[in-house]
Image (cartoon, grey):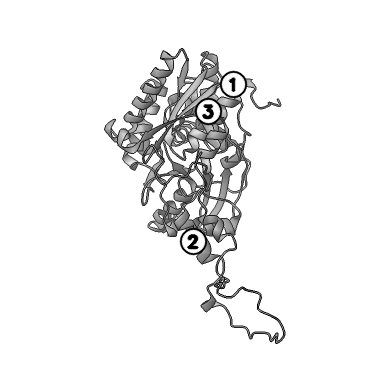
Amino acid sequence: MVSVLLQRLSYTPPPWASALAAPTHGRIKLGHLPTPLMRWACGALSELGVRWSIKRDDLSGNELSGNKVRKLEFLMAEAVAGGHDCVVTIGGVQSNHCRATAAAARLVGIDAHLILLVRDKSFGDEPGLQGNLLLDRLLGATLHLCSGSDYLRQGGDLAAMNRINEQVAAELRRQGRVPYIVPVGGTTPLGTWGYLSAAAAAAAEEAATFDPIDHIVFAVGSGGTAAGLALGSHLAGLRPQLHGVAVHHSPEHFYDLIDAEVSELSGGSFEACAREMLAIYPGAGAGYGVATPELMAFCAETARQSGVLLDHTYSGKALYYFAQAARAQPERFRGKHILFWHTGGAPAPQKRNAKSCLTRRAYPPPSARTPRAPRAHPTRPPTRPAGRAARGPHLLPFRLALERTPTPL
């Protein structure tokens, strides 16, 4: 059957998931699914002879690209069925989840209220027209800014985000609105069905390949993707071992969160714990959304080798820190076939580290280049105005563009 975007679809769980609390409102088709699964010329762990494939959930749409679309198909179906006229969600100022939620809400005809955590309410050094923040504004979302100090006063944790979500929703109810609350990352038992379904699709795709997959690697940001893949893979009896990289919070936080999600979905009848279903590695590095020069260089090198862009908050960190963990146990991964599940995220790197990486690696520095005898042009006048410094060949021509700061709205 051919399905079109925004079509309301019924949903029947796979037989192996029949014991779980199934979605009652189906899903609304928002993304271009299934996404491609393909060979990947990734150079990471080449010393171990690793063979790479990639699952391109970054190609699930335009405004809705990434793993969020799978969750939002179920969440938006429930919002529309419940007669809600707006959605409320929360995330960082450059949140992929908030941008995707705003796009999904507009697609189904309701308003979006985004609570964005910022350094201070004047945006600090965050420009007002950059990355996802620009897209949020273009999509007409109403922005509610929450400073870091206000967030910390609320507790500075996941429970604090839920309280702030509810506070904004309560104010909207006083105004006569009917808000639908989407927790951070869309991580709810209902949203988990997005990747339960993906696990089933991955099983079918793997069966069609001649090179079985040994390991699956993905980023763990809010925990919903990890919960869905872990539970789906376990119930379906899939062969690959799962490896998540926590780009925010500790692995222990996500083990507990996944256990809670699974318990709610199964009514407490599911006995396996998260630690038995997947391994989660620390991958926050210098902090959530913070890129180091080494990470930026790794993402740039991966793009040059394979033509696939990784962002420095999710997918780039996931691959970078998994590679470090794999080198500590080489025999486990030597010669294996690894699937990297690209969960999306637009590259919006920090200016300082991006500029350093790109200008340093674009061309070899002058000292490393083979000297070439200058050609004589005795009658040619100088082409550079007096006093203007020469630009070295190791600098990219768009260096000045990287230094330009957009004007806030």
- How many C-alpha atoms fall within 10 Å of the one at disc 1: few (<14), some, or many (≥20)? few
Q: Residue at x 63, y 34 (%)?
A: 32
Q: Element under label 3?
A: helix
- According to the picture, the residue beneath numbered tag 3 turns out to be 72
Q: Which residue is drawn at the image coordinates 42% and 39% (left, top)?
A: 221
Q: Nearer the viewer, residue 107 or 172?
A: 172
Report which residue position mark 1 lands on: 109
Of badges 3 and 1, the one in the foreground is: 1
Choose the circle earlier in sequence order: 1 or 2: 1
Quadrant assignment, res 4: top right
Q: Which residue is mark 2?
A: 357
Q: Amino acid at mark 2?
A: Cys
First in sequence: mark 3 vs mark 2? 3
- What is the CA distance from the residue labelled 3 to the residue labelled 2? 35 Å
* Residue type, label 3: Leu
> Where is residue 362 drawn, in percent x and y?
56, 65
Say which element carries label 1: loop
Q: Amino acid at mark 1?
A: Gly
Q: Residues at badges 3 and 1 in contact (C-beta under 8 Å)? A: no
User: Quick one: label 3, few (<14), some, or many (20+) residues within 10 Å?
Assistant: many
Q: Quadrant of the N terminus?
A: top right
Mark 2 Cα-neighbour bin, 10 Å: few <14, some 14–19, many ≥20: many
Decide: is 346 above or below 18. below
Image spot of residue 408 (x, y percent): 49, 42
CA distance for labels 1 and 2: 42 Å
Q: Nearer the viewer, mark 3 or mark 2?
A: 2
The residue at the point 70 percent across, 85 percent down is 377
Whole-percent x and y of residue 159?
32, 29
First in sequence, mark 3 or 1: give its number. 3
